[in-house]
Image (spheres, rainbow, N blue to C red):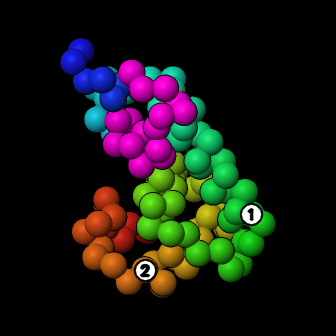
Amino acid sequence: MGNSSMHATANQLTPAKALEIAKNCEDGCVPASVTAVLERAINELWQRIQAQPSTYVMKKEEFIIFNYYRSRFANAAAAQQAVARFWNNFQGDMTEIEGGRAS
């Protein structure tokens, strides 16, 4: 495959780029380096939410990653509250967020 970004190491990938690669992978075959970056990002974000479960407001970039993993947190009240806080505080263009305002 001619796409060199598919072969980038975890140290070279930003969470946003890793997410772009993951969403564009055919057959769900996400490279391990991409998964590692995304897992680190979602775990760090989840720790921030848990540390401030009633006050943490995700940034747009964080929400986009969180939204990718939303099913993982479907039964977590802190996650549902964090999503609600994001939308209550979001002032950008909703089209910037994939999936719009899904509940």
- For residue 55, side relative to residue 4 (left or right): right
Residue 11 at x, y percent in the picture? 54, 33
Q: Measured along the vertical axis of the image, is residue 49 above or below residue 22?
A: below
Q: Decide: marks 2, 1 in contact (CB < 8 A)?
A: no
Q: Three-letter amino acid code at disc 1?
A: Gln
Q: Residue at x 34, y 42 (%)?
A: 20
Quadrant into which the C terminus falls: bottom left
Mark 2 vs mark 1, CA separation in Å:
20 Å
Left or right: residue 90 compared with residue 50: left
In the image, what residue type sits under mark 2?
Answer: Phe
Q: Is residue 103 visible?
A: yes
Task: Examine the rendering and report whether any part of residue 35 can be seen.
Answer: no
Residue at image coords 44%, 67%: 60
- Per the image, label 1 sits on a secondary structure element best described as helix
In the image shown, does 73 or 89 lie closer to the viewer?
89
What residue sits 71% from the left and 78% below the top?
54
How crowded is the residue under tag 2: few (<14 C-alpha within 10 Å), some, or many (20+)?
some
Q: Which residues are magenta?
A: 7-22
Return the residue found at the far left.
Answer: 2
Q: What is the number of the mark on residue 50?
A: 1
Q: Quadrant of residue 75?
A: bottom right
Image location (x, y in percent) of residue 18: 42, 39
User: In the rendered structure, does residue 15 fall within the stretch colored magenta?
Assistant: yes
Crowding at dot 1, Cα within 10 Å, few <14 / some 14-19 / many 20+, comes out as some
* Residue 24 place in picture, x, y as percent: 28, 35
Quadrant of the rendered image containing residue 95: bottom left
Residue tagged by mark 2? 90
* Disc 2 secondary structure class: loop
Q: Give the vertical position of 65 relative to 95 (above or below).
A: above
77 shown above or below 3: below
Asked if residue 31 is among those painted magenta in the image, a careful observer would answer: no
Above/below status of 72 relative to 30: below
